[in-house]
Image: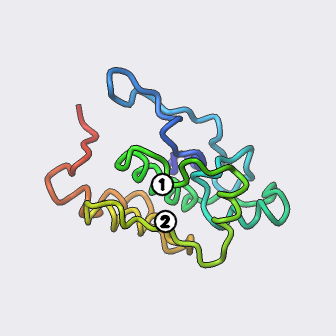
Amino acid sequence: MHDAGLVWTDVKVENLVMKNGKVKGIDLESAVRIGGNPCDYSPEVCPPEFAREFLKDGGSNFIRRTDYDSWSLGMLFYNIYMGRGYFERKGASTITKSLAIPDFAPDFSEIDDDKLRDLCEKLCRNQPGKRPGTTATLLHPFFTSSGVGKWSFGK
């Protein structure tokens, strides 16, 4: 996505097209050009900087960058590992207000895999510029420590 100049903006379980327990496609209806403005958003996977802009002016002028997807990917990994979303049973307004708190940081202590917990914490840093990009994410010990990692992208 990023190599194609796009930000997915909606990295979540519901947008993975599954067949026989395997990801066969992804729903990209919310993808926008890097530097573009949002067409919609999902509170449960949007980063804090967008939540703050959304509460300020609806977020229509928010500039999408690739670190938006880094945050969302961390939330996706949490959801897959824990079997539930981070903000499970919370409404959109509550989620957005929580994310907008200046020092908001998700608590991933429930993730008992140390490497995955570390990766999620890095992906979901409150400061967008400090989140790892695609290459750094794939080179994280969670993926590299056992050959192709715990979650294989092959076969």
Disc 1 marks which amino acid?
A: Met
Picture quarter containing residue 61? Answer: bottom right
Residue drawn where x is 37% and y is 49% of the image? 82
In-image side of 146 versus 95 (left or right)? left
Left or right: residue 17 compared with residue 127: left
Residue 110, image quadrant: bottom left
| Circle 2 SS class | loop
**Along the line of sight, which residue is nearer the eye, 56 or 9?**
56
Q: Which residue is mark 1?
A: 75
User: Which numbered dot is residue 124?
Assistant: 2
- Identify which amino acid the numbered label 2 is placed on: Cys
- Identified at 58% across, 35% down, the residue is 28
Identify the disc placed on residue 59: none
Above or below 61: residue 130: below
Residues at marks 2 and 1 touching, judged by CB atoms closer than 8 Å: yes
- The residue positioned 82% from the left and 56% from the top of the image is 58
